Image: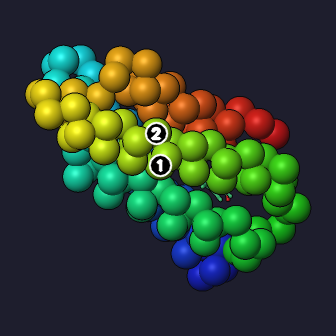
Amino acid sequence: MDPLQYLRLIVVFIHLSGFALLFGAWAAEQFSGRRQVTPLMNIGLAIAGLAGLVLAAPWGISYDLNYVKIGVKLVVLIVIGALMGIGQSRARKGGGDGKVAPGIFWSIGILTLLNAGLGVLWR
Ligand code: HEM
């Protein structure tokens, strides 16, 4: 296999690891009832986002990239990041238990899953 093609596979693997970290950390918070934005979620988002940007450039492939799909994924990622930031700061200011509002926290997980779905199913 062409080395560049293989390098791209490695970046896809890193991209998926970021997704796993973000979604796994989110699910642990959601289903334990803690509902806090954790450092692991931020790290997962950063890894998925950075690797995604690297994959958004046309290298190591012989087909054309779908830039509409990539643009939508980028917007969804930005919304996820904004919800994480807003949720976290509101929870802190509230002076309570640091729990993010249920609507915001559910949206973070659902949008993360949506982005994975877009990556796999939008062809
Ligand atoms: C929470 C955010 C994200 C999640 C959960 C996510 C998830 C995924 C998944 C599951 C795939 C499928 C990999 C495969 O088919 O083997 C994928 C592919 C891809 N993602 Fe993302 N992604 C995210 C953000 C982004 C962002 C921000 C970008 C770019 C701006 C991006 C660009 C891509 C590209 C270009 C591919 C195709 C890789 C290829 O087949 O060469 N992703 N993503």
Q: Residue at x 77, y 36 (%)?
A: 122
* Amino acid type for the residue under numbered disc 2: Leu
Instruction: For the residues labelled 2 and 1, say whether their Cβ atoms are less than 8 Å apart.
Output: yes
Image check: 62 left or right of 48? right
Image quarter where the N terminus lies is: bottom right
Please provide percent x and percent y for residue 98. Answer: 17, 33
Vertical arrangement, residue 38 with respect to residue 36, above or below: below
Q: Measure how far apart labels 2 and 1 are at the Cα level.
A: 5 Å
- Location of mark 2 (residue): 83
Which one is nearer the viewer's eye here, 44 or 81? Answer: 81
Is residue 72 among what the camera can see? yes
Vertical arrangement, residue 68 with respect to residue 28, above or below: below
Q: Secondary structure at mark 2?
A: helix
Image check: 77 left or right of 107? right
Residue 9 falls in image quadrant: bottom right
Name the mark on residue 81.
1
Vertical arrangement, residue 31 with respect to residue 65, above or below: above
Is residue 27 among what the camera can see? no
Image quarter where the C terminus lies is: top right
Please provide percent x and percent y for residue 17. Answer: 39, 52
Residue 28 falls in image quadrant: top left
